[in-house]
Amino acid sequence: MKKVLVMISGFFLLLLSAAGCGEEPKEKEGNKIYYEETNIPLPEGTEMLYDIYEDGGVSVLGDAGNGIGTFSYSEKDKSWEQTNKPWEELSDSVVIDAKAFNEDVIYVSVLKDAMLTQDKEAWSQLAVKYYVLQKDGGMKEIPMELPAEDDQQQKNIFQCMICDEDMLIGKDNSDSIYCFSLDGQQKYKIEETESINGMVKVDGLLYVAFSSQEILCLDAKSGKPADGEEKIKQFLEVSDGEYVIRGTKESIYKINSKKMYRYDLEKKTSEQLLDFSHYGLKNGYNFKILPNENGDIYVLYLLQDGTYALGKYIYKEEGIEVKAEAFTIYSLTENYGLQRQVDLFSAKYPEIRIEIKYGLSGEDGTTKADALKLLNTELLAGKGYDLLLLDDLPVESYIREGMLKDLNEITDMDTLSDDLFKNMLEPYADEKGQYAVPCGFLLYGIVGKEEYVNSFADTDDFLTLAENTGLPFAVHDYNLSETANIIYLQHASECFRDDGTADQEKLKELYSYFDRVYRISGNSFGEELQEDGIGNGWEINSMDRAIEWIYYDKLPFVMAPYMSSDGLKAAKFLEDEQGYSCGYLEEEGELLYNDRMIFGVPENTEQEETAGKFIEFVLKEGLRKASSNLMILPVNPTVLEAQLKQSLDGKDIYTISSFGYESDPEMTDVKGKTWKEEECKKLQEKISTAKKVKYAEAEVREMVIDGANDYCLGKKTLDVSAEDTARTLTLRNQE
């Protein structure tokens, strides 16, 4: 059974909107937190996780490759075991929602056989089916009937919020409350006009929390109004942010605006348990809560990249001292990879409070020039930050000006460098010290028919071959921008002299290539040439932050500009299974790379010990845990090899659009293929002598692309475009 992200309704996300408490929670004294966080690795091969439940320990409900599955975690062995027999009848269905009644029984809603339905109209008419599943492989359909909003039945879906022994309670798309028996009989329906954020059942009473802060209390069996307890109602009140509640026999747990609270049903008191700002939870959403009998709490949640995390929170009576002063990290732009590393670090060192400050928020009108000027002022004044993410910052200038600390003073760089590609350290070192360290890098390439890959090294030959085929090789402007970006990186270093001035004649040659790219670019839908030329600022800015695989059945190649570990596995699949070839961007026979997630420490930091600890953590542990999700390759050769050799268990890496010249796209799954050890070693050898690509900064590329657009769109002549761009680039580099 596969889970696909389909916009069937706005119902698929857990309840968003958050809770406040009518009664103030008890606050702990001093700068202490009282729960220690441990990250539990999740079962391999599970892309979607639906619920968390108790089964002699912590268990999760998720995709299992050939269908939905239950997985139990062994604290002793630190491993997961699948505990159910397959429900083969649902193997080709799309899961909408799934919840655990208990350790043996599961509720699930699906679009039955949706993966076998190719016709769009037929797919849109599929109705939702509801089932109760048993771990021994048994299953029973629940024949629920909900009024459809229109002729597309799946647009009105029952979302189960409470699974009880003899009934299911939840809501539909219009926030009407439903209660069904397990044989599908509707026990009651209550129409509501307000948005429902959560439900909890306590002593036979159903409490329904609305976004308006109103709390409705009903008899759970009959649906008749009931009074309920005022303290519970106060505890359940909703305010801004994400809102999640879960009831047990003894307590109600609530997540409310990045904090977790507990209401003791016997004592009728509430207390705050977790402040998410101290844990990896702070950047999560779609939370699922599971307390255990020992007082520990498990939380399953989603991260910003769509992957899941499972945290265990163990109570420490003595508390964990939290440093009053935060450790501050500066990043010019929002960076998920950085945030993921901070989350992992915080899980190991919860006593260290970390704040990330972004120079560009996109909300206050600050330009990049403004942000850089402010940062430089702060660094020169000895204020500001304890660690810098140097991506898109003038790191060479900072090194020349003595603004970065020698990392040898705060880390054991000799030992660290033994586990890194040493050539990637060299751009940030001199005879006196090592001033920055990259954690990841990008490779650039092309996958396609052999003759195209062979001609890739010579742009003129490559474009001549493309022109002679009579086939366009870009279907939309984003793909066109990628093609232009590859050609730019091939020739960028030629366009600048050693003193930083731009070579106008070389720019003219590059612009001629861009114009040819633009002229032969086409569109499978017969639209006009792109009005923005070969790309706009947004597309170019996103180049180092996105991986786009685009393949068309009548086109001669696949553009694969950014090779993550998944990208390399996909390329291996296309080479070995589809008969394509793969090539990389090179210069004089050496691979070209662009490094990312580059860390440096300001000279004036007062927290150099923590800065060193953070850098060492990322290089030793963080890359192992997260680099496959960061769209970068790790600078650690051992970690890279482990990722490339890791089994995918039949997982599809990319869904590729094969448009050709048809009105409807045919979607093709590209499976990844693991690398053999000798293949990994050969790639590592090539990477170990690779050169850092020059002038790859988004700002420089934008200037060049903007000038090329003026020429391609006929706004300026070739001479004028090249002259204007050369002047702008020279001034920029001199500054």
Image (tube, rainbow, N blue to C red):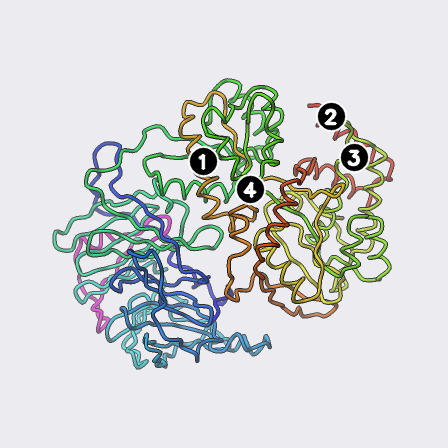
- At label 4, which amino acid type do we have? Val
Query: SS of the residue at dot 4?
Result: loop
| Residue extending furthest toward the left | 267
Q: How crowded is mark 4: few (under 14 residues within 10 Å), some or many (20 or more)?
A: many
Three-letter amino acid code at the position of disc 3 = Cys
Q: Where in the figure is residue 16, as x and y percent of width and height?
A: 39, 55
Closer to viewer: mark 3 or mark 2: 3
Type of amino acid at the residue the image marks with label 1: Glu
Q: Is residue 588 above or below residue 262?
A: above
Q: Nearer the viewer, mark 3 or mark 1?
A: 1
Q: How far apart are marks 3 and 2 (CA)?
A: 14 Å
Front disc: 1 or 2? 1
Tell me if mark 1 has few (under 14), some (14-19) or many (20+) residues whose alpha carbon lies within 10 angstroms of its own: some
Closer to the chain start, of discs 2 and 4, is 4
Q: Nearer the viewer, residue 687 or 106?
A: 687
| 4 and 3 marks in contact (CB < 8 Å) | no
Q: Distance between the residues labelled 3 and 1?
A: 37 Å
Percent position of residue 72, x then y: 32, 63
Foreground label between 2 and 4: 4
Residue identifier under label 3 = 495
Residue 731: numbered disc: 2
What residue is pinned by disc 4?
635
Can you give x and y, in whole percent of width and height, for residue 40 in the image? Answer: 36, 52
Q: Which of 439 and 93 is in front in this view?
A: 439
Residue type at numbered disc 2: Leu
The mark that comes first in sequence, 3 or 2, is 3
Magenta stretch in the rendered image: 214-243
Does 429 appear above or below 211? above
